[in-house]
Image (cartoon, rainbow, N blue to C red):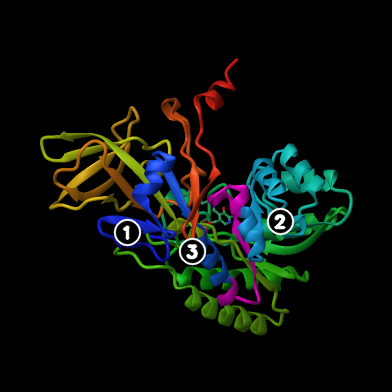
């Protein structure tokens, strides 16, 4: 739950506002986002690693207002397409603090990045090095995405540091060294750093330590001065009450120690660290409110069907993600139940939870930890309109993304 969330009777108070009041005022489904939690998590990274550049992974919660908060907190921003860059421009995000990513950047993406003057572009293929070299005109700063071959022990769909997948230049095959030479051959490009991102929802600090060792080894071998070392994001967030938060201070201490030790050992200057947290900043700031539309008693379980589903949260279907759920506004004797969505698929299951035995249509459910990769991954499946995001802060609520309407949907059809 967001920081400071508490019970008032059977109601849940988020950002100083009872959730039942938010549901009544803004309708359901809706995503509530606690601004103070987002800001304090962003600040925690800056405090834990004051020597690092903290780059918010804009893909985790693409929204100009959230990008503005990040700019105010002194973070940089990672964008992975011209679309995310357009949101950053709307937010007035300073170009000199934007990094562009992506394993495929179209020429439109690259041109938009060059035109806005983003500070660094992370190149991800030999084709891209050549293309960017031709498009750029003056010393565009680039980083090279390296696949360090480290297993982050996470879901296969979000493990990006292992060999034999689409991201980056492999350390093992020598492609990473080759990429460093290729960038050096492009007069319009200037290599400033190496980048890696081992995956998402990573729990073990040891995976990052191993990554640092391998990356410093590459820095030593390449014989070129590397000013920046970007370790990517991936720091886990808790989704269930039994899960713990990422050990940020342990991470900072161990990564700093390993970096200094390895650089001394290889006699190379210590590069400036960059990190790219997304989920760990926004996930726990978000709560989704759903209204119960129907309750069905199956042979072995109770299905509680709500007015949203895999269109606003495809994570259970995509990654087997688990969520908690709570009925707000009243209590009662609890029983296990399966919370399902409104979409035409049996896999549209949001959570296994416990709810009062008399849960019925009209009740409001709150689902925590929905701030990251929810709005980002939302779709219009079954032509369901996407929910709004309501920012709450100190008793004040305001939409920062409005609810999608049928007019929005119809606008695209010819
Ligand atoms: N840097 C790069 C280059 C990335 O690709 C990502 C996430 C991040 C940073 C931020 O990772 P985070 O700190 O948020 O874990 N849709 C999936 C997550 C995909 C992550 C994609 N890349 C999910 O809902 O679990």
Q: Is residue 23 left or right of residue 52?
A: left
Determine contact: label 3, label 1, CB under 8 Å: no
Q: Which residue is mark 2?
A: 98
Residue 277 position, x and y percent, is 55, 61
Disc 3 element: loop
Query: Label 2: how many residues lie within 10 Å, few (<14), some (14-19) or many (20+)?
Result: many
Estimate the spatial distance between the alpha carbons at disc 1 and disc 2, rounded to whole Å.
33 Å
For the question of whether residue 258 can be seen, the reply is yes
Q: Assign the N terminus to one quadrant of the image.
A: bottom left
Determine contact: label 1, label 2, CB under 8 Å: no
Determine contact: label 3, label 2, CB under 8 Å: no
Estimate the spatial distance between the alpha carbons at disc 3 and disc 1, rounded to whole Å.
16 Å
Residues rendered magenta in the picture: 46-66
Q: Which residue is mark 3?
A: 235
Query: Label 1: how many residues lie within 10 Å, few (<14), some (14-19) or many (20+)?
Result: some
Q: Is residue 234 left or right of residue 356?
A: right
Q: Which residue is mark 1?
A: 240
For residue 410, the mark is: none
Of residues 382 and 356, which is closer to you in this image?
Answer: 356
Residue 232 position, x and y percent, is 58, 61
- The nearer-to-camera label among 3 and 1 is 1
Estimate the spatial distance between the alpha carbons at disc 3 and disc 2, rounded to whole Å.
20 Å
- Classify residue 173 by image quadrant: bottom right
Identify which residue is drawn at 66% across, 80% down: 263
Query: Label 3: how many residues lie within 10 Å, few (<14), some (14-19) or many (20+)?
Result: many
Of residues 288 and 25, which is closer to you in this image?
Answer: 25
| Beta carbon of the mark 1 residue lies under 8 A of ligand 1 | no
Residue 17 position, x and y percent, is 41, 56
- Classify residue 16 by image quadrant: bottom left
């Amino acid at each position: 739950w967001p920081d400071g969330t508490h019970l008032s009777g059977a109601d849940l108070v988020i950002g100083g506002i009872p959730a039942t009041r938010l549901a009544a005022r803004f309708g359901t489904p809706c995503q509530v986002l606690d601004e103070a939690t987002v800001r304090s998590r962003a600040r925690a990274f800056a405090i834990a690693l004051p020597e690092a550049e903290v780059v918010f992974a804009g893909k985790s919660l693409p929204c100009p207002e959230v990008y503005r908060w990040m700019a105010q907190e002194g973070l940089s921003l990672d964008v992975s397409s011209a679309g995310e860059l357009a949101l950053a421009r709307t937010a007035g995000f300073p170009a000199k603090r934007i990094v562009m990513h992506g394993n495929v950047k179209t020429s439109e993406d690259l041109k938009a990045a060059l035109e806005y003057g983003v500070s660094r572009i992370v190149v991800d293929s030999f084709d891209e090095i050549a293309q960017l070299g031709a498009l750029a005109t003056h010393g565009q700063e680039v980083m090279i995405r390296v696949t360090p071959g480290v297993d982050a022990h996470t879901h296969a769909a979000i493990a990006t540091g292992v060999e034999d997948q689409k991201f980056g230049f492999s350390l093992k095959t020598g492609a990473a060294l080759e990429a460093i030479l290729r960038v050096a051959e492009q007069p319009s490009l200037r290599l400033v750093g190496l980048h890696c991102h081992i995956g998402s929802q990573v729990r073990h600090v040891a995976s990052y330590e191993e990554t640092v060792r391998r990356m410093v080894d590459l820095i030593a071998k390449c014989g070129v001065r590397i000013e920046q070392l970007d370790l990517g994001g991936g720091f886990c967030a808790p989704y269930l009450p039994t899960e713990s938060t990422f050990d940020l201070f342990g991470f900072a201490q161990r990564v700093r120690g390993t970096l200094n030790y390895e650089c001394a050992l290889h006699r190379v200057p210590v590069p400036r660290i960059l990190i790219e947290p997304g989920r760990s900043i926004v996930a726990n700031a978000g709560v989704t409110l759903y209204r119960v539309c129907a309750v069905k008693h199956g042979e072995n379980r109770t299905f509680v069907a709500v007015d949203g589903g895999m269109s606003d949260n495809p994570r259970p279907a995509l990654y087997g993600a688990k969520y908690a759920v709570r009925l707000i506004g009243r209590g009662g004797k609890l029983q296990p139940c399966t919370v399902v969505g409104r979409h035409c698929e049996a896999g549209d299951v949001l959570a296994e939870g416990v709810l009062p035995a008399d849960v019925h249509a009209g009740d409001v459910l709150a689902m925590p930890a929905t701030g990251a990769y929810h709005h980002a991954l939302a779709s219009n499946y079954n032509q369901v309109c996407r929910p709004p995001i309501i920012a709450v802060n100190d008793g004040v609520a305001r939409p920062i993304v409005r609810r999608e309407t049928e007019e929005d949907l119809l606008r695209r059809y010819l």
